[in-house]
């Protein structure tokens, strides 16, 4: 096999959907598995759909995911430039080759004439009117005009497009690594526009030309491009080039399996469908991202790899290096893969548990900085150590530990009603005095002291522990009480006990 060369070729028309990230990931894994090259090409031939910031978003998303490309926008390479709008002079040359070999033709039809054609076909009962082998003879193009008339129109500057000439009666075969042989009769294809009146190529021509010139050996892309594959096979044949191997990936489906996963599904069901947060530059609408929602990139990639592929074993946790070793395009399924937001959280929880306390604390410190709170790294590490089991997403670090950095402003009324009794203030002050006298304030020592106090005073364990938790954190949540007391320290613990007594003692219980 020649050197494997694959590409990810997104259009900068908005944020990168996780389906696009999966396509990039599978291309990356395939290239690395075979010692090949992975390219990033920006396909911006449709300038009317260009969205400012989308290209930068794509690049930043791949960087966050750890999907590094060998050639492409921002990196360069032997086939520069890698942005199609900077390559437009190339495409007309190949459109002219198709014209000169009779494989394409000029079309001068106005929008009104095209609409009239569609209406005529509808009147004849044609369900999907199209410009094809059966209708092109009725239209204004170089097939129906004389050579002289065609030249006259071209020389006068009249707007035109260049269309491919689809053969009239042929079975076109696409060999797909995932789907096997896919055959489509040419009667189902229309004479697609290859070159637009604005001087830009369409996706179809630019895609084929660039893949050939960039020596792409395998085209791994989403299922939505499968209907275009016969056209692309024809273009390769018409230009006398060897086609790459194709692999069309299955769709990502909604959690219920009914239809393609969309941004609206994420908005409706409360999970991201984009890798990073995206702010629409036109409407200022904000869409959530996995990074900002608190997912680790390693967890995101591991989850994404399993949406369509399986290793053939029971193993679910894979590093990027392990994915490279295990990946096989032949093990990608044909059918759509349901997205499971709970499984995504499961992966993230696993990867968070794998972080050291110190590494996890860097995420906590970042959250604290955003809230204007400074914290010692060793203290933050200890907080992570005793709260990490409850952390599924990174924002949970704050939700599970805020009371280590700021005292409670209020107390849960239901917990107060259940555990705060008339005798509670006196008992808490007695316990505070015992704690104050302790020389060893480790979690183990504190637990021994509190249990001894409960035993000696013939009190209920739940009554005392829940009351202590209430005064320290404001409710009935958090890690073990002894661990909270030890980490808060003696001075802060005693202060919170007294503050709670002052706040709650006057309540009518």
Image (spheres, grey):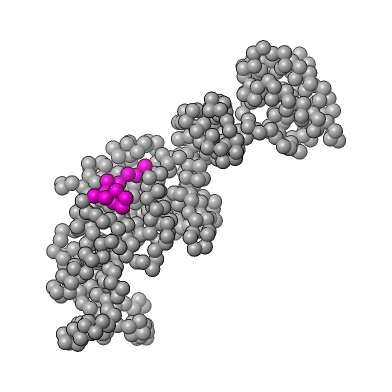
Task: Give how far across and how far down residue 376 sits, in percent.
Answer: 56, 28
Q: Is residue 35 left or right of residue 338?
A: left
Q: Give the vertical position of 439 relative to 50 (above or below).
A: above
Task: Give how far across and how far down residue 505 sits, in percent.
Answer: 83, 31
Q: Is residue 270 visible?
A: yes
Q: Give the vertical position of 419 relative to 70 (above or below).
A: above
Q: Residue at x 29, y 48 (%)?
A: 75
Q: Quadrant of residue 351?
A: top left
Task: Give how far across and how far down residue 222 sits, in percent.
Answer: 34, 56
User: Could you tell me which quadrant the C terminus lies in?
Assistant: top right
Q: Is residue 418 left or right of residue 106?
A: right
Q: Residue at x 60, y 35 (%)?
A: 373
Q: Is residue 150 left or right of residue 440?
A: left
Q: Give the vertical position of 221 relative to 345 (above or below).
A: below
Task: Give how far across and how far down residue 378 sits, in percent.
Answer: 54, 25
Q: Residue at x 58, y 33 (%)?
A: 374
Q: Is residue 308 visible?
A: no
Q: Main secondary structure of the magenta part?
A: loop
In this picture, which residue range is highlighted in magenta?
A: 66-77
Q: Residue at x 76, y 38 (%)?
A: 413
């Amino acid at each position: 096999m020649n050197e494997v060369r694959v590409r990810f070729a997104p259009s900068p028309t908005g944020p990168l959907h996780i389906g696009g990230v999966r396509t990039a990931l599978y291309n990356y894994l395939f290239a690395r598995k075979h010692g090949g090259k992975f390219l990033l090409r920006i396909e911006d031939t449709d300038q009317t759909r260009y969205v400012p910031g989308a290209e930068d978003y794509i690049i930043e998303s791949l960087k966050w995911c750890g999907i590094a490309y060998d050639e492409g926008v921002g990196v360069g390479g032997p086939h520069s430039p890698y942005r199609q709008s900077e390559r437009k002079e190339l495409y007309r040359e190949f459109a002219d080759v198709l014209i000169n070999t009779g494989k394409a033709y000029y079309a001068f039809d106005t929008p009104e004439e095209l609409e009239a054609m569609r209406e005529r076909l509808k009147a004849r009962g044609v369900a999907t009117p199209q410009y094809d082998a059966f209708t092109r003879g009725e239209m204004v193009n170089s097939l129906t005009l004389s050579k002289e008339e065609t030249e006259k129109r071209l020389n006068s500057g009249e707007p035109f497009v260049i269309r491919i000439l689809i053969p009239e009666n042929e079975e076109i075969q696409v060999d797909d690594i995932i789907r096997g042989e896919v055959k489509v009769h040419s009667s189902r294809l229309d004479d697609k526009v290859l070159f637009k009146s604005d001087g830009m190529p369409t996706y179809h021509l630019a895609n084929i030309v660039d893949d050939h010139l960039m020596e792409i050996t395998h085209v791994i892309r989403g299922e939505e491009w499968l209907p275009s594959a016969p056209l692309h096979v024809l273009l390769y044949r018409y230009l006398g080039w060897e086609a790459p191997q194709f692999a069309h990936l299955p769709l990502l489906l909604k959690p219920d399996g009914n239809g393609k996963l969309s941004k609206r599904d994420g908005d409706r069901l409360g999970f991201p469908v984009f890798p990073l947060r995206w702010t629409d530059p036109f409407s200022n609408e904000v869409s959530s991202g996995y990074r900002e929602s608190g997912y680790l990139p390693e967890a995101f990639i591991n989850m994404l790899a399993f949406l369509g592929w399986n290793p053939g074993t029971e193993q679910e946790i894979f590093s990027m290096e392990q994915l490279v070793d295990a990946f096989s395009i032949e093990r990608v399924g044909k059918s759509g893969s349901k997205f499971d937001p709970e499984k995504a959280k499961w992966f993230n929880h696993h990867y968070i548990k794998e972080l050291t306390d110190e590494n996890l604390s860097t995420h906590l410190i970042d959250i604290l900085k955003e809230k204007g709170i400074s914290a010692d790294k060793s203290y933050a590490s200890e907080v992570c150590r005793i709260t990490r089991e409850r952390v599924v997403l990174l924002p949970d670090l704050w939700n599970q530990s805020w009371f280590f950095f700021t005292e409670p402003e209020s107390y849960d009324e239901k917990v107060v009603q259940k555990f705060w009794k008339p005798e509670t203030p006196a008992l808490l002050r007695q316990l505070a005095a015992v704690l104050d006298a302790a020389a060893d304030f480790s979690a183990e020592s504190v637990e021994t002291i509190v249990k001894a106090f409960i035993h000696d005073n013939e009190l209920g364990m739940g009554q005392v522990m829940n009351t202590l938790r209430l005064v320290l954190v404001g409710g009935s949540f958090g890690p073990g009480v002894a661990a909270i007391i030890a980490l808060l320290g003696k001075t802060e613990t005693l202060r919170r006990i007294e503050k709670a007594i002052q706040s709650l003692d006057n309540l009518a219980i």
